[in-house]
Amino acid sequence: SVVTIGECSSGKSTAMGRLMYELGLVSEEKMKQIEMEAKAMGCVNSKFAWILNKDKQERELNKTIDINIPPFELHDEGKKFDLIDTPGSNNYMKNMMTGIALASAAILFWRMDYDEYLSDDVMCLDDHLTLLNAKGISQVIVAFTQMDHVNYSYEQYQCFRSLVLARLKRFRFKERNIQCIPISGLYGDNLTERSANMPWYRSVTLLDAMKGLHLPDETKGYPLRVVVKDVYDKGGFGTVAVGSVVSGIMKPGMVVKFAPTGVEGEVKSIKKFGYELPFAKPTELIEFNVPDVSVSDIHRGHVASDAHFSPAFAVESFVAKVMIAKTPGVKPIFNGYTPVIDCGTAHVACKFKHILNTIDRHTGRPRADPGFVRGGDICTVKMEPIKPMCVERYEICPMSSLGRITIRDNNQVIGFGRVTYTTEKTFGAGI
């Protein structure tokens, strides 16, 4: 699963739509229809973005609002990707977080004509790198897009490449896991073939870089966990849940349990892009039919697990070791602070019930009951979800997003961490 991430108007949807078109995943007839619709609305340069952005509101606003997951298959390699196109605007941060939670690698888009507001753009880049880091995504392709806006300038590319690489290294991304590629999504430069407009660039295309991505460490031996993205009622078949397998194996006939509600149901079938699967393995985005469960009992943020083998559960509280990157405003964070916690595909307000300790910056030793924390502090915090939520200890499955949390306040990422301890919520306690 590969997620696209970048600031609004950085050309994510245009580049990926053009790539799909060049790979033959969009027919000429369909492309002509989209182009006519784009011309009619005066948005001809958005025609490739509209391959992914099919929603009327997205087209009118000319921006991605929700995550889009088109079928994406490389026929010559027999290699399949789940491509996850996410919004860039902070107004839709929750949807962006959901997309990142479903992915195992990322394409980070940097627009080449950044200039006047470069400091704001770097701040936005840092937020995106924080999100990738927090979710454990280590493989990053950096697409320096809209090269046509700077006349395919080598000097401009090198300038921004150095800046972005420095930020990546600051966030401890390893150079061997980073690929930098100058592209133009609208004109197709360096998407599937090296561009004649950039003779100075002699490395891989965006497609080559995607083919070189490797699967994360094996997670088949861990308990089944599927984070739910969407749910709908399919006439004649009943409830269908859409989600990503983060660990374990799902098979038809298996009885799954949904946390945090505890509702159970048998999996009748598993599909991917309309094709039935005999099983679903980690990193796959799937649809699975659970007709015994009401559509109103499953929501985005829920977690499906094997009801008979180490099922997931709702938590009364949990303890996490957290890095506070910054605090909202200039005030420190005290006990009782209630930000939004992102875990898996869930976004739930959680109270800082008790800041247990913080690491002294001078001695490196923990200091108990500090009462408050500031930006730059590493601390251990006991948190209580305001509504039912499923999180798990990081050590249960290090590759799973359920042991990692991101802390947000007013659509700003202010911290991230790992869950170290959980207290199960009993079903008699108000779930």
Image (cartoon, rainbow, N blue to C red):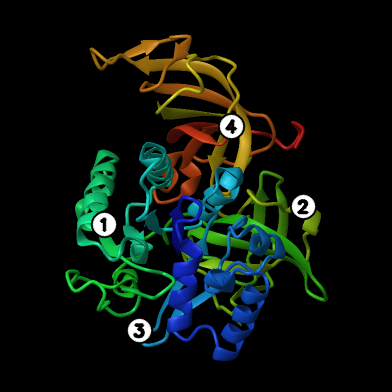
Q: Which residue is mark 1?
A: 178
Residue 156 or residue 96, whichever sits in front: 156
Q: Nearer the viewer, mark 1 or mark 4?
A: 4
Q: Which label number is shown at residue 297?
A: 2
Residue 344 or residue 98, whichever sits in front: 98
At 46% from the left and 61% from the top, the residue drawn is 11
Left or right relative to 153: residue 244: right
**Alpha-carbon span between mark 1 and mark 4:** 31 Å
At 63% from the left and 48% from the top, the residue drawn is 301
- Residue 106 appears in which quarter of the rendering? bottom left
**Alpha-carbon span between mark 4 and mark 2:** 28 Å
Left or right relative to 266: residue 295: right
Looking at the rendered structure, the secondary structure element under dot 4 is: loop
**Alpha-carbon span between mark 2 and mark 1:** 41 Å
Looking at the rendered structure, the secondary structure element under dot 3 is: loop
Classify 10 Å Cα crowding around label 2: few (below 14), some (14-19), many (20 and above): some
Q: Which residue is mark 3?
A: 77
Dot 4 amino acid type: Asn
Task: Choose the circle earlier in sequence order: 2 or 1.
Answer: 1
